Amino acid sequence: MNRYEQTTIWNRNLAVQYESDLYSKERELLRVTFENFRERAKVLASEIHVNLPDFTVHDISHIDALWEMTELITDGDYKLTPPEVFVLGGAFLIHDLGMGLAAFPEGVSELKKSMLWKDTVASLIKGEDKRRKVTDHELQNPSKEIEKEATNEILRLLHAKHAENLAQVSWTGTDKNKYYLIENSELRESYGKLIGQIAHSHWWSIEELQDKLPTKLGAPGMFPQDWTVDPIKLACLLRVADACHIDDRRAPGFLRAVRKPSSYADKHWAFQQKLYQPRLERGRVVYTSKSPFRIEEVDSWWLCYETLKLIDSELREVDSLLADTNRQQLRAIGVASISNLERLSKLITVDGWQPVDTKINVGNVAKLVKQLGGEQLYGSNLFAPLRELIQNATDAIRARRILEEEDESWGKVVVRTGVDEDGYYIEVEDSGLGMSPKVLTGPFLDFGQSFWSTKLMHEEFPGLESKPFSSTGKYGVGFFSVFMWGTKVRVSTRRYDGSRDSTSVLEFQNGVDDRPLLRNAFPDEYIKNGGTKIRVWLSSKDIIKRLLEPRALRNYKLTYQEFLENKFPTLNVDLYYEDEIENTKAKVISSNDWKYMDPLLLIKRTIIRYELLSDSSKEEIENFSKNMRIIKNEDGEVVARALIFPRELEYQEESLIGGCVTVGGTNTNSLTSVLGVFIGEPESASRDTGIPLVEKEKMIEWSSEQSKLIAELNCGDELAVECASVIRAFGGECNNLKISKNKVGYLSYSEIVSLIKASAFKEIICTSDSSVFLYEKEHKCTIDLLDNAFIVDVGVPGILQTGSNRFVNWPPIRFNDRLLSLESYLEQAIAEAYGIDQSLMYSTSDISDDDYSFSGKIGTVSNNDVIMEGINKIYAPVTIMQ
């Protein structure tokens, strides 16, 4: 006799009754059908380990044990009808079968039809690089390793959902016969779907049971009228029985030795292998261990503790639901000693150590959010909340575009300012995906957890992961920056595929110090076409003033349109501004217009108050604007539109920087010696520094082309040398631009090679142009340079400005572990002229560095020798002198 047949619930309901039984035939039908059901489920359960060998035992022994767990938690005294026992037993049989590929009649090809397959494969291919674009070919032809990992992951994620259909699907044999788990068609029709729903429910939250399961069901015509079925009661029994079954039957020692589970999985095996079967005492489930957990098994003990906490939580939640809905409660209402580690360690014993819960705990969540979600992360930058809101809004719009197959011009963000009875406010509204209540009260409020990195994204928006989408927001702290503006905040949202009356409203009346209020929207708050609207009431009207008066323009107040245009120059959605006080509305940015707009207009967008520059600066910029070029990465993505321009822009003794890096369309930091924009990715959670995404080879191509374009401008030798210095920093070739000065004047690379070859110098003297400039300024003279002396810019221009104490080396292009400067370019020309390897030249010459400095004569002034420190002496090889 099987152990489940010894339980009270079996014997009272499905076993042969020894007393006169008016319904013996009906009972026999259920019993025989169940036994055949069990034999077929047993076959599928035995295949689970093939796909998920790391998991503890999920075969028929686990399934049968759920009868005993039900006996335990009810103490054998629970009113059930025979059909309820049949349905519950059926749910036991199939609840985990989907963890094996055998439960899918079409095998892995069936998994590949699901959106989750594409999302999972795409996620695995991307790995840590969430910006990586996955091609259709990669999705359809993943490596064997990724296909196996995806199969296992999907089986784990889908097994509960798949269980919903298992009692009704069929397997076709080679004889073309169809095989069902429930052979009897009447019982399959009556209870197959319900068994699947209850099996699925073990992965739902307790709140979902009432929402998704039917109410109490009557009896089919072949059974007595009082043989009803209560799905919610059965779902409660399944989830608790399944949770409670952790003992050595789930993790036999020999099987563990054979399977050799991975490191993390082995911790599960280790603690379950040590546990006796639980018992019930005074309403508490008591777990005890066969042997103590040693010091090297500390992690397994804590994993056991966390598992027991989950079981305790399940028991308490089920007890509450059954009591609240006037259903018979279980005898078990919690786990013994779970609230006291010392008492628990007397049951789950330890050896050589004592469990003390030293797990990092955040005692004041509100304080943490205020600090890390506000000034501690963003400083006193009042622009940060607006940046975060708009970047989150554009993420949602881009995601909706992909799901609804809209083009890049679809969608808009509206920034709105106004005043009402609660004071001045700033509001950001988008036409993006919107949020379900599950997202709004889950990842949205989970500080430090970005929705885009959760499994919930796959559930809410299947197919998005496998499409070319990557979010700007990654850290889950952006929204909380709004509390830098004020403590009263209202979030209104409606999923794009929901009805208008499904709009939800989340209100914060006192920042994060009090619990927010979630409510249904009033009719005048409905969002018509989906999306999200976030309104923040400002703690001070001065916040708007401080936003519109940047330090670089102390005596000029920007309009909101000018401010937004400068701050969001590469936004890929339409951006509008509405002033509800003045009743005005204006379109500020058109989606991706930076890619095609007039070059000078783009430059004006990135330079605050361009019109205030001097006429000569504007004339020079206009001349150079013709050099603006688009840069595309290898995959065709536009990652920059820029030109090289090394001049400083002056306005009222303040230096203005014209180029910028944008992240998610937002101007995050500046670029010197460059006009235009580079698309970047955030360096940190604060997203205040972007690192350009342009590939090295494309950077070199662009800067080399800039050299040719600048040469055609005839902008003068001194400016050409400055341009050449920037071009070298980007790795480009300077072509005909002047790079160094000699006695004969400014020379290009090719002119330097020709001069050295023609002159046959025994040695070359190189020195810094800044040293020569300072000497001549101090002595009010002009040095008559030696024939073999060259002055050159030895530094590398700092192009990427972070606006912080963090130094970021960009562009990161080097030669022989040295950044590319005009000095190294001059040395390259000398090496070419001498016909030797540049790296060999370094080892045979006197090159100044931080540890050694050489001095020598570079020229004369009034027949007096001029001696300079820090020069480089490059010696000609013997062969050139013969």
Image (cartoon, grey):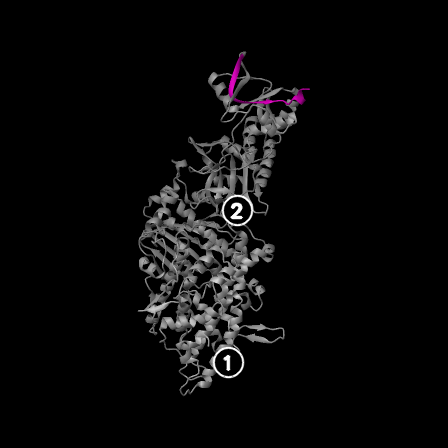
- Amino acid type, mark 1: Glu
Relative to 114, is 881 above or below? above
Given this view, does label 2 or label 1 mark the residue nearer the observer?
Answer: 1
Q: Position of residue 158 (x, y in %)?
A: 50, 64
Circle number at residue 61: none
| Residue 275 visible in the displayed image | yes
Tell whether 296 sits left or right of 342.
Answer: right
CA gap, disc 2 and disc 1 = 64 Å
Task: Check disc 2: other Cα within 10 Å, few if <14, some if 14-19, many if 20+.
Answer: some
- Amino acid type, mark 2: Asp
Question: Which residues make up the magenta segment?
Answer: 864-882
Q: Which residue is mark 1?
A: 186
Relative to 13, is 791 above or below? above
Secondary structure under the numbered disc 2 in the rendered image: helix
Check if residue 354 falls in the magenta segment.
no
Check if residue 876 falls in the magenta segment.
yes
**Looking at the image, which is closer to me, 472 or 455?**
455
Which tag, 2 or 1, sits closer to the chain's start?
A: 1
Q: Which residue in the rendered view is the most extreme toward the top?
A: 863
Task: Check disc 1: other Cα within 10 Å, few if <14, some if 14-19, many if 20+.
Answer: few
**Looking at the image, which is closer to me, 823 or 348?**
348
| Residue 598 visible in the displayed image | no
Q: Position of residue 752 (x, y in %)?
A: 62, 25
Q: Which residue is mark 2?
A: 593
